Image: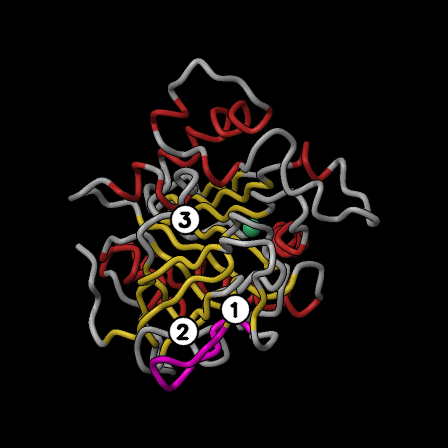
């Protein structure tokens, strides 16, 4: 859905339901659509990304409709997009590609299976980190901006070349807004989206928001903890973004191994409380005072 002012200006894109079962993103986009968000200049595009997966949504197996053939959020590297391979999701990615390639600012709305305080995730580029900080600096919105170095398994939408090119201008940011299927998650998505639209021009031109009413916390992912055994279990049902004050605190057990925090004030990012063997269980992140990215 494209809302075009007819005037030259930033191209602003919001995506929801990149994971077909995360329909909170669909609700948030529908709320925006009803307000017909035509910007003063530039263009706003709202994208419901994986509707074919969502069509298969079944309450008794709500995780089965995350995707149809493969995860739409792992396909955005040119080596996949330009390949001869075929899948429902690759086809959709290729269809959406022109809208992503013209985006100056991208916000990608997601939700989580396990309880987690909302946070922003950005690729390792200063311009995207600035975008997330601009969004996070309004009172009442998530305050944590996490930089990570990609996801094993493939490039996410926020890592499309438009946003990764050194010296480029496209900025991207992912929002983990809260639990799947919760009304509060839709509210968080809507608030952040409105902030995004309101500050888009300032961020596009100056890299900063005009209105800042709260400090932002920066962090960077240092470790991916994968379940090596089928007996992996956390010692507590950690809520995402919990900060563990002391290095050496046992957070989980994996067979005979104890998993400990490697440094003080370690953040537990979006724990998967019941990981299967070989699955990512949690990511560890360290607070930083400065942007670490280029
Ligand atoms: Zn997701």
- Quadrant where the image shows the C terminus: bottom left
Task: Tell me: residue 157, above or below residue 32.
Answer: above
Question: Alpha-carbon distance for marks 2 and 1?
Answer: 9 Å
Q: Which residue is mark 1?
A: 253
N-terminal label among 2 and 1: 1
In the image, taking residue 277 as reference, residue 246 lies left or right, namely: left
Locate residue 122: give its quadrant. bottom left
**Do we see residue 114 in this rendering?**
yes
In the foreground, 240 or 289: 240
Mark in front: 1 vs 3: 1
In the foreground, 249 or 214: 249
What kind of secondary structure does the magenta stretch mostly adopt? Answer: loop
- For the point 46% across and 66% down, the residue is 257
Residue 281 percent coordinates (x, y)? 51, 59
N-terminal label among 2 and 3: 3
Residue at mark 2: C-beta within 8 A of ligand 1: no
- Quadrant where the image shows the N terminus: top right
Mark 2 Cα-neighbour bin, 10 Å: few <14, some 14–19, many ≥20: some
**Do we see residue 35 in this rendering?**
no
Of all residues, the one furthest to the top in this rendering is: 84
* Magenta highlight range: 239-251
Question: Alpha-carbon distance for marks 1 and 3?
Answer: 38 Å
Mark in front: 2 vs 3: 2
N-terminal label among 1 and 3: 3
Q: Which residue is mark 3?
A: 106
Task: Tell me: residue 242, above or below residue 230.
Answer: below
Residue 292 percent coordinates (x, y)? 20, 63
In the image, taking residue 186 as reference, residue 79 lies left or right, namely: left
How many numbered discs, if any?
3
- For the point 39% across and 46% down, the residue is 158
Q: Which residue is mark 2?
A: 260
Question: Alpha-carbon distance for marks 2 and 3?
Answer: 36 Å
């Amino acid at each position: 859905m494209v809302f075009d002012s007819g005037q030259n200006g930033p191209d602003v894109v919001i995506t929801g339901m990149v994971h077909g079962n995360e329909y909170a993103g669909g609700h948030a986009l529908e709320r925006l659509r009803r307000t017909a968000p035509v910007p003063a200049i530039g263009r706003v595009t709202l994208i419901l990304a994986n509707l074919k997966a969502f069509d298969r949504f079944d309450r008794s197996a709500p995780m089965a409709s995350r995707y149809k053939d493969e995860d739409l959020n792992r396909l955005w590297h040119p080596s996949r997009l330009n390949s001869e391979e075929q899948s429902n999701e690759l086809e959709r990615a290729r269809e959406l590609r022109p809208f992503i390639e013209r985006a100056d600012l991208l916000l990608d709305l997601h939700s989580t299976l396990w309880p987690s305080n909302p946070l922003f995730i950005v690729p390792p580029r200063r311009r995207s980190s600035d975008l997330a900080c601009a969004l996070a600096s309004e009172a009442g919105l998530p305050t944590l901006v996490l930089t990570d170095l990609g996801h094993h398994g493939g490039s996410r939408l926020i890592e499309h070349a438009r946003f990764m090119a050194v010296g480029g201008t496209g900025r991207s940011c992912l929002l983990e807004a809260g639990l799947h299927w919760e009304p509060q998650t839709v509210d968080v998505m809507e608030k952040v989206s409105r902030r995004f639209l309101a500050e888009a021009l300032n961020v596009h031109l100056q890299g900063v928001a005009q209105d800042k009413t709260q400090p932002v916390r920066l962090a960077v992912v240092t470790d991916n903890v994968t379940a090596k055994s089928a007996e992996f279990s956390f010692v507590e049902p950690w809520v995402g973004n919990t900060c563990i004050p002391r290095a050496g605190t046992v957070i989980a057990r994996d067979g005979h191994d104890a998993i400990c925090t490697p440094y003080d004030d370690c953040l537990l990012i979006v724990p998967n409380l019941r990981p299967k063997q070989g699955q990512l269980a949690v990511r560890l992140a360290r607070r930083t005072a400065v942007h670490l990215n280029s």
